[in-house]
Amino acid sequence: MRENDTGSHAVLMDKVYRHQRYIYDLTRRYYLFGRDRMIRELALAPGESVVEVGCGTARNLIKIARRYPKAQLFGLDASAEMLETARRNLARAKLQHRVTLVQGYAEQLSPSLFGRLDLFDRALFPYSLSMIPDWRQALRAASDSLTPDGRLHVVDFGDLEGLGWIGAGVLRNWLGLFHVEPRTEIVRAIEHQAALAPGQRGQMVLLPGRYAFLWTAGRAGIGAIGLNYVAQQTQAGGNSSS
Ligand SMILES: C[S@@+](CC[C@H](N)C(=O)[O-])C[C@H]1O[C@@H](n2cnc3c(N)ncnc32)[C@H](O)[C@@H]1O
């Protein structure tokens, strides 16, 4: 992604969330499914470090801070507007000392953005890959930011195939209004890789109707799924949106 692209993307995200941020948590609980399950299944050991990429209002970081009182928590978001709400929510929850927030781009994720030398134990993408323009680069940056045993945790919209073409079409159009694009390629790549090399892709769970997927993977799994297969498809002229 070019410098200007990231700059204009931040402006776009601020525009999307300038007013939405006030009703975000209230409204999204009805359709961003799987986030609490992801948090439960993190099973963090004391002292483990977690970065949420596209942390929005800090809704997830607050839940993680309460469930895992010894975890080190970091949040990255492109939108200054969302981060303003995140800071307010953390202060209200008296958890501001537990979480470090930084404005920046997923595509440029690195521990140094937070003034850290140590790599992260976990990188979380709850409903953010579907908004990140260069999501392949974001996965690459996340992989490079993880310890050798580190894990990626994604929850996001699936390929919606179980909703029927009318249901899926209506949902896609509606999500498009918010600049959200389900990353169908990722779900397909995980399933493709699972067929070729079971166990190499990490673990994926699909929610009913293939509405959403939860995926956890180590660095090898991210490389196998997120980057290589999708890159081959792109070169071969397959459908690949960005
Ligand atoms: C749908 S919201 C999800 C927020 C939060 N993870 C949750 O589960 O409530 C997506 C978030 O990703 C952020 N975002 C979009 N593109 C980004 C990028 N390239 N880098 C960092 N954050 C980005 C948006 O500003 C927004 O706060």
Image (cartoon, grey):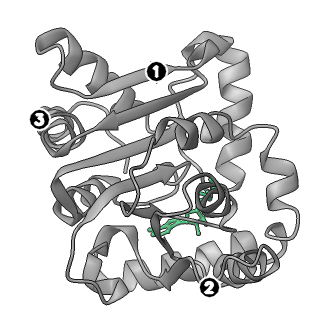
- In the rendered view, tell whether residue 87 sits above or below residue 236: below
Res 205 label: 1
Write down the quadrant of residue 84 in the picture.
bottom right
Q: CA distance from mark 1 to mark 2?
A: 32 Å
Q: CA distance from mark 3 to mark 2?
A: 35 Å
Q: Residue flagged by tag 3: what amino acid is it?
A: Gln
Secondary element under disc 1, as helix, strand or loop, is: strand
The residue identified by callout 3 is 232
Asked if labels 1 and 3 touch by Cβ distance under 8 angstroms, the answer is no
Specify whether 139 is left or right of 114: left
Mark 1 or 2, nearer chain start:
2
What quarter of the picture does the N terminus occupy? bottom left
Nearer to me, 242 or 66? 66
Callout in the foreground (3, 1) = 1
- Mark 3 surroundings within 10 Å by alpha-carbon count, few (fewer than 14), some (14 through 19), many (20 or more): few
- In the rendered view, tell whether residue 227 sits above or below residue 177: above
| Residue 35 picture location, percent across and down | 61, 41
